[in-house]
Amino acid sequence: MKKRLLLCITLLFLLTSLTGCWSKRELDELAIATGLGLDKTENGYKFTVQIINPAEVAAKTISTRTAVTTYTSEGRSMFEALRGLTDKAPRKVYLSHIRKVVFGEELARSGISETLDFLTRDHELRTDFHMAVAKGMEAHDLLTILTPMEKIPASKMYFSMQTSRDYWAPSIVVKIQQLITQILSDGQEPVLSGVYNVGDLEKGSRLENVEDVGAPTDVRVDSVGVFKGDRLIGWMDQAQSKGFNYIQGNVRNTAEYFTCKDDGSITLEVMKAKSDKTVSIQNGEPHFNVKVMVEGNIADVECEVDLMKVDAIKELEQSFSKQLTILLNETVKDVQEDYQSDIFGFGDLLHRKDPAYWKTVKQEWDSTFPEVDISVDATVEINRTGTISNPYKLDKEK
């Protein structure tokens, strides 16, 4: 009897200590946002969210309703603009599933540090979303474009950026903690990928855009924006963006087009790329050296070359190494001359290598960086030539 009484008292005590789902929120009470666009206005900010229509995402039959809806509000602060959505959206906007945050170019050029405060301070936002800049346009306009294949445009941008990084290399995936670290760093400036539309913007927001097999309007990711502090100062083109990623060791897989000695071209599928940066102090001046090692396979031959000969392969490797070296050195020079922004992190490398010397140049690094000596040397190694030996034209002549 005493044991039963003791058990009952214990159970009652446990029941009083249990917390219920006091903070629960049902799905049908929330508007789940997957994309967030931030733009600058005269008096503050424009806040655009891309909201999922769950019934359309899960639908098995085609309807005339879109899978997402966008809502826009303006406010003097980010949070005021967010709460201003309540008089437009039928439910409270839920930000925990954001996959893409896009800054309008005007906002990016004026500075993004104040918006980053909101994005890191709000407890609902996670930190695994991708960040980008709407190149030459407002983020609001970009989020209104409906995309084929992916019903949710924010997911399309998310996966396109990952695919571009993994298989083409002119873009870079940046998350919020990495961006903040680079902004606060003394020796490295931030970069963000650019996202923009191709085609008629008005047509892109209509359902007909995803009903046409050719999709008249689409979203592209193929360039990198250069920052100084928290401000966007310019854009690298596609070749420069790939060059930047080679130097940073970010290239995983891509295609490189090389010209042959006489005529024609060979395309190399890059399978592996590494980068090694070093610095030395000579006569009181820093000298940086970057070695880029590339391994790849022959993917396409449009010139006369005998791939069965070892000497021919070695000659191609030397030619490819020279061409890539020129591209990478031009990329560094262009950044030094046009932007004067150390997006490569050479200042951070100098800081880690020689902290005492870094203290002497830290304050003037912005003006010193454009003049420092930076040498890039690329080495290309061909591993495989494909499933055939020589080009069909050369085999026919034999």
Image: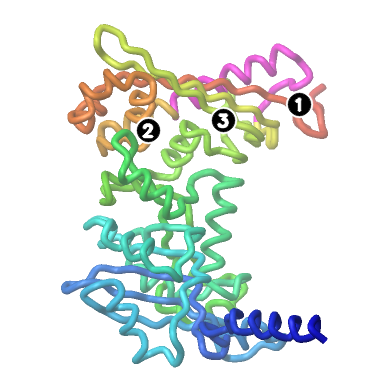
Percent x, y for residue 45?
Answer: 25, 72
- The magenta stretch is 303-327
For the point 36% across and 88% down, which residue is it?
86
Indicate the quadrant containing the N terminus: top left, top right, bottom left or bottom right.
bottom right
In the rendered image, the residue lying farthest to the front is 2
In the picture of the structure, the residue carrying the numbered disc 3 is: 258
In the picture of the structure, the residue carrying the numbered disc 1 is: 394
Point out the tag, 3 or 2, that comes first from the N-terminus: 3
**Quadrant hosting residue 124:** bottom left
* In front: label 3 or label 2: 2
* In front: label 1 or label 2: 2
Amino acid marked by disc 1: Leu
Magenta span: predominant SS is: helix
In the picture of the structure, the residue carrying the numbered disc 2 is: 345
In the rendered structure, the answer to whether residue 271 lies left or right of residue 34 reads right
Amino acid marked by disc 2: Gly
Against 165, is 149 above or below? below
- The circle on residue 374 is none
Q: Do the CB atoms of the residues marked 3 and 1 lie less than 8 Å apart?
A: no
Against 13, is 229 above or below? above
**Quadrant hosting residue 294:** top right
For the point 41% across and 61% down, which residue is it?
196
Element under disc 1: helix
User: Any magenta on residue 270?
Assistant: no
Element under disc 2: loop
Q: CA distance from mark 3 to mark 1?
A: 19 Å
